[in-house]
């Protein structure tokens, strides 16, 4: 049995109920929360801060800070393609694993062709990303994927059902990958959208789809998906003030 955690860390900005807008970055709170969970595999989304004009800081400072402190984990990180028209929120994906990672890969997830207004400025959706790596857990070869899809429900009343390109590309990669596979992420699927059913048709179950994982709206955005090679032996949503998202943590055991 091993444990996995998926967490949109909102680029290290803690949640303030009195002022849910901008708050100062507090990576200490992120790190303390991750250490408390003590998961064997950690999927992180929105690791870094997005900057106006699409600028991406190298080396990624938040990832470097966490990597130094989570020194008993192996890890990988990637930025998506830069977008000068993106909203300056969070970006960047990381996977941390107590077992060594190999065969890193990144899959570009192209955005839909649409525009929207944000604070009086015309914006366009960004490329998103699926990152993956292989590891060995209890003598089983395991593929790990992490992703953060576009929140189309926030853009001019659109939906991921109407703009399925990113979802469909992820599904394609899942179907093409053999063996035990675990995927964490922020899937930004609003209530009524069919993402969970779509991945279910591809043979992947989420460990929970009923408890809210986002503080700003009563949505289940964050998931741990697994194929039939695993059995979920306990899954829970963990509230935290270290982000505007709650984390999802599960224990898994191999079926064979």
Image (cartoon, rainbow, N blue to C red):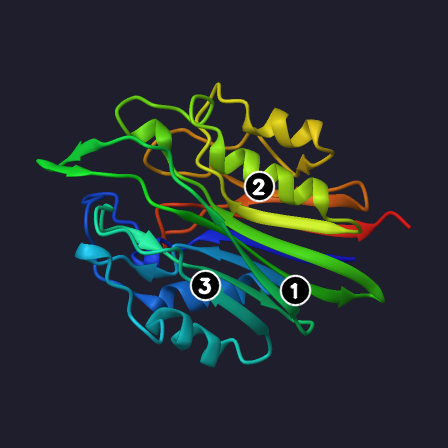
Q: Is mark 1 on a helix, strand or loop?
A: loop
- For mark 3, what is the residue? 78
Q: Which tag is nearer the camera, tag 1 or tag 2?
A: 2
Crowd around label 2: few <14 · some 14–19 · many ≥20 (10 Å): many
Q: Toward the viewer: 117 or 206?
A: 117
Horizontal side of 188 relative to 175 (left or right) equals: left
Please tell me whether residue 212 is drawn above or below residue 86 in the rendered image.
above
Please tell me whether residue 1 is drawn above or below residue 138 in the rendered image.
above
Residue name at image x 49 percent, y 22 percent:
193
Please tell me whether residue 214 is drawn above or below residue 196 in the rendered image.
below
Screen quadrant of the N terminus? bottom right
- For mark 1, what is the residue? 40
The image position of residue 155, as x and y in percent, is 28, 29
Horizontal side of 240 relative to 225 (left or right) equals: left
The image position of residue 231, as x and y in percent, is 79, 44
Q: Distance between the residues labelled 1 and 2?
A: 24 Å
- For mark 2, what is the residue? 170
Crowd around label 1: few <14 · some 14–19 · many ≥20 (10 Å): some
Disc with the residue nearer the chain's start (1 vs 2): 1
Crowd around label 3: few <14 · some 14–19 · many ≥20 (10 Å): some
């Amino acid at each position: 049995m091993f444990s996995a955690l998926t967490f949109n860390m909102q680029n290290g900005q803690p949640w303030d109920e009195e002022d849910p807008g901008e708050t100062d970055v507090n990576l200490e709170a992120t790190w303390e929360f991750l250490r408390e969970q003590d998961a064997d595999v950690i999927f992180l989304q929105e690791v870094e801060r997005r900057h106006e004009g699409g600028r991406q800081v190298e080396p990624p400072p938040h990832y470097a800070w966490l990597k130094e402190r989570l020194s008993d984990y192996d890890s990988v990180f990637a930025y998506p393609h830069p977008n000068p028209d993106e909203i300056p929120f969070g970006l960047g994906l990381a996977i941390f694993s107590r077992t060594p990672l190999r065969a890193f890969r990144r899959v570009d997830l192209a955005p839909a062709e649409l525009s929207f207004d944000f604070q009086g400025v015309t914006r366009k959706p960004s490329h998103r990303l699926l990152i993956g790596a292989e590891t060995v857990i209890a003598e089983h070869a395991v593929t790990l994927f992490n992703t953060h899809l576009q929140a189309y429900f926030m853009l001019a009343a659109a939906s991921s059902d109407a703009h399925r390109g990113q979802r469909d590309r992820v599904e394609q990669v899942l179907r093409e990958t053999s063996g035990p596979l675990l995927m964490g992420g922020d899937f930004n699927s609003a209530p009524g959208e069919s993402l969970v059913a779509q991945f279910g048709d591809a043979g992947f179950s989420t460990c929970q789809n009923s408890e809210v994982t986002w503080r700003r709206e009563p949505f289940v955005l964050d998931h741990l998906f697994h194929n039939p090679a695993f059995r979920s032996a306990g899954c829970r949503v963990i509230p935290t003030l270290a982000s505007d998202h709650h984390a999802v943590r599960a224990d898994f055991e191999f079926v064979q």
